[in-house]
Amino acid sequence: MKVVEEELPGGITKVILEGRLDIEGAAAVDLRMNVLAGSRTSVLLDIQGVSFLASMGLRSLVIPARAIKSRGGRIVLFGPNELVGKVLKTSGVDTVIPVHHDLSSALAALQ
């Protein structure tokens, strides 16, 4: 799992995830996501490059999202493919973390 961070205007941190968010992928992103959850208030998770999402991967997204929200911040998911989108919807994660399919609406949700 590859994790790349970018700072965008307006104090938004964009986190680009690429690869499989399975047990190994979750282990690779957990620490970084927890650090972000404790230090950022506007996070855009770009998951266009995530090819697979398992339950451990869901946990790696939901726990930091709840931490960010508890501190008054916002987090959104951007660009899931069809398979990943279906997992997000079936699991109900899309009710915890808003999912956007275009970048402009994702950024607007963080303003």
Image (tube, rainbow, N blue to C red):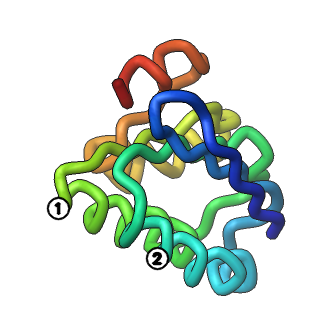
Type of amino acid under label 1:
Ser
Residue at (47, 15) in percent of width and height: 105
Residue at (72, 76) in percent of width and height: 25
Please report contact status of discs 2 and 1: CB closer than 8 Å, yes or no: no
Q: In the rendered structure, which disc, 2 or 1, sits on the residue that comes first in sequence?
A: 2
Q: Bin the neighbour count of mark 1 within 10 Å (Cα to Cα): few under 14, some 14-19, many 20 and up.
A: few
Q: Is residue 37 above or below residue 51?
A: below
Seen in the image, is 68 located left or right of residue 45? left
Q: CA distance from mark 2 to mark 1?
A: 13 Å
Locate residue 22: give its quadrant: bottom right
Percent x, y of residue 38: 37, 72
Residue marked by disc 2: 34
Residue marked by disc 1: 70
Question: Quadrant location of the C terminus?
Answer: top left
Where disc 2 sits, the SS reads helix
Residue at (57, 83) in percent of width and height: 31
Type of amino acid under label 2:
Asn
Q: Bin the neighbour count of mark 2 within 10 Å (Cα to Cα): few under 14, some 14-19, many 20 and up.
A: some
